[in-house]
Image (cartoon, rainbow, N blue to C red):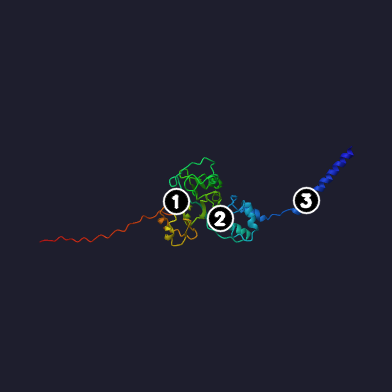
Amino acid sequence: MDSTILTTVIMLGLLAATLAVILYIVAQKFKVVEDERIGETESILPGANCGGCGYTGCRAFAEALVKADDISAMFCPVGGNTTMTKIAEYLDKLVETKDSEIAVVRCLGSCENRPRVNEFDGAASCAVMAATYSGDTDCSYGCLGKGDCVSVCNFGAIRINSETLLPEVDEDKCTACGACVKSCPKLIIELRKKGPKSRRIYVSCINKDKGAVARKVCKTACIGCAACRKACAFESIEIENFLAYIDPNKCRLCRKCVEVCPTGSIVELNFPPRKPKVEPQEPKANVVNTETVTN
């Protein structure tokens, strides 16, 4: 009996040792040696895992940076130029400096400018609302105000104004990751150049209806009158489908377009107050003394 138990133990031990050797050989044959630079590159990244770089997270982006021969077109919007420069120095690769961007909301359709004509009694989701019907106003292009953009922002950089029911972007918190842009079913959120001193000019409307129709549903709708294009000396404004668009790469922030817009659909941000216009005064007429002096 004792010899049987001893034999069994020995056989199991030999089997375990054999399997261990086999597993070790297989592991060595198929092991994947990870480039240590991937972990180091990931540590340089901000760790937001927001997807703004186009990859699923910072780990995937770090791996792509290490493996790519040319990383000039790759960019981390959260870390910005500072982070990309550090990575380029570490990997001994070249990167291009890019202008800082920020999310802008291209809709001025507040409750005052774009009255609500019905009430949506469903899930508080812009995606659901957009799939169900055009919206609770007569403008089928404007913001739905249910806050899908707010829920996807990992940085708390956007909120819904309770009075206007429109999203508002916190410039100090926005990282231009683009999550809010992707979440908006109406495509009213856009990433634009942040501009010098955070000054920006853009058309805050995406209504492509004819002028009379657009103006009827929203007081501040762009009517495609082309007055802004005529006023621009830099050819930065195009009119397409009755809608004006200002190219941020051509705009020189002169603000002449803002002055001539009849509906106020062009927004100017972070500019100093305009100086009041001084009306030219007519020169006073010379007064001739007609009194005669008598002795």
* Label 2 to label 1: alpha-carbon separation: 42 Å
Kindly check if marks 2 and 1 are in contact, taking CB atoms under 8 A apart as contact.
no
Give the residue type that dot 2 points to: Gly
Observer able to see residue 267: no
Structural crowding at the residue carrying mark 1, measured as other residues with C-alpha within 10 Å and reported as few (<14), some (14–19) or many (≥20):
some
Q: Earlier in the sequence, mark 2 or mark 1?
A: 2
Whole-percent x and y of residue 177? 56, 52
Give the residue type that dot 1 points to: Val
Compared to residue 109, the image places residue 288 above or below, namely below
Kindly check if marks 2 and 3 are in contact, taking CB atoms under 8 A apart as contact.
no
Determine the image quadrant of residue 44: bottom right
Q: Residue at x 63, y 54 (%)?
A: 62
Foreground pick, 41 / 280:
280
Res. 11 mark: none
Whole-percent x and y of residue 168? 49, 48
Looking at the rendered image, the quarter that the N terminus falls into is top right
Foreground pick, 273 / 242:
242
Give the residue type that dot 3 points to: Tyr
- Circle 3 residue: 24
The mark closer to the camera, 1 or 3, is 1
Q: Earlier in the sequence, mark 2 or mark 3?
A: 3
Res. 80 mark: 2
Count of marks overlaid on the render: 3
**Residue occupying the far left of the picture:** 295
Which structural element holds mark 1? helix
- Circle 1 residue: 213
